[in-house]
Image: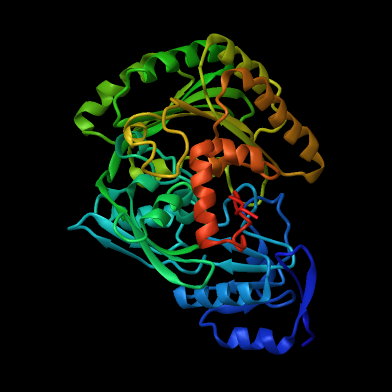
Amino acid sequence: MEDLRVATTTGTDTLLEEAAVEEFKAGLRGELLRPGDDGYEEARMVWNAMIDKRPALIVRCAGAADVIHSVNFARTNKLLVAVRGGGHDVAGNAGCDGGLVIDLSRMKGIRVDPARRTVRAEPGLTWGEFDQETQAFGLATTGGIVPTTGIAGLTLGGGLGYLMRRFGLACDNLLSVDIVTADGQLLPASTTENEDLFWGIRGGGGNFGVVTSFEYELHPVGPIVLGGLILHPLARAKEAVQFYREFTSTSPEELTTHLGFVTSPDGHPMVGFIICYSGPMEKGEEVIRPLREFGPPAADMAGPTPYTEVQALGGPLYPPGRWNYWKSNFLRELSDEAIDTMIEQFSTVPSPFSAAVLEELGGAGSRVDEDETAFGERSAHYSLLITSGWLDPAETESNTQWTRNFWEAMQPFVRDTVYVNYLDRGEEADRIRAAYGADKYERLVALKNKYDPTNLFRLNKNIQPTE
């Protein structure tokens, strides 16, 4: 074996001696992959096909000891580091060129305590896997609505989901974590231990270390909820969105209703209500009746459904292997002019896999004190997410430009704030700062100075330490 050329945190390349790599490998319980090794090509791939990174080393961690060993090795050798949980970040921060990927995807331990209504889960779990385990006990917490999304990244960035109006965001249901910080320490963090760090990870992403264990509060949900899709032709879109605006102004917190502009499998542009009602089933039909009666709809696919299936509704829209580009903001207003703009922009969509979604917020998530977590925006009623997806790399420019045009046309109606988990590549300092607001951002910088002053964990929605 030859010495290995690697990328460093200084922006330069250097050589790692083969003996040092072998010594590192010998200290791992998990697997170390290098270019050319069996499994390397699969391990380096992430969900977004736009991202094509080639790390020098990939550590497929077996446990917290491997994470500590990897962090210490990276810090000692000033290696560029990426951390992978589910690998579902649209920005592709789970990979890097020439550096070290700390891959947590094989750490899938989970233990539900049905008596305490809590769960302890490792960071390699996806939401589909997590929900399968907790639903065995009729329990759930707010989680991602694409089943292949990892629990780690979604939770650390805040965690929007169908249950957020009833139970708060994923980070609001976080009770504690174990986290490996840049100095190689494994620290507990909760409201009673390392409280400052616990504040920061609830919305501040992976800036402060590698979380090796999450403890969540669970709630009685399912196994059957009332959910699904109700679709209307795009020709009825203005009336449908106006109705949606009125309906969501008074809907109960047990119901979350998103609105999506999508293309049907047979190629027709549609607007649809995406429903999850988790309250008493005997009241559910009465609650969603106005959604059924508006129209008539082109298709009504809502009804009593396993919670795990409702959670998986977004899966077909966002499978691995497609090229993806996103833009997003929280909305300031859903005026008639904003509605007209959305309809006009979607009418030019170049790909049947692209969508524009209004996510209904409010409820329990809006009642959490602004200073309780690092998550930045609690008062908006809707989040606007524009997602383009396509299969042919030659169509990249037309799809990314459509997304940018749509987003720019909506700027008169949005807030400066944005959900950090939706930030795409190239959206760096200004938008990250706006996601948190000036006061929270400065507080996050102070935490970064304390726990990661050299910015070892920089491949994320990065909070840069004071130089």
Above or below, 435 relative to 212: above
Q: Residue at x 66, y 60 (%)?
A: 95
Q: Residue furthest front?
A: 467
Instruction: For residue 265, say whether it is visible.
Output: no
Pinpoint residue 274: horizontal percent, then vertical percent: 44, 30
Q: Residue at x 45, y 26 (%)?
A: 380
Pinpoint residue 246: horizontal percent, then vertical percent: 40, 13
Give the camera-side residue of 301 and 331. Answer: 331
Position of the N terminus by quadrant: bottom right
Q: Residue at x 57, y 35 (%)?
A: 434
Position of the C terminus by quadrant: bottom right
Q: Is residue 458 left or right of residue 218?
A: right
Can you tell which quarter of the image residue 19 is in?
Answer: bottom right
Give the camera-side residue of 285 and 133. Answer: 133
Pinpoint residue 125: horizontal percent, then vertical percent: 45, 60
Above or below, 205 relative to 78: above
Instruction: For residue 275, say whether it is visible.
Output: yes
Above or below, 376 relative to 358: below
Pinpoint residue 379: horizontal percent, then vertical percent: 42, 28
Q: Is residue 285 left or right of residue 33?
A: left
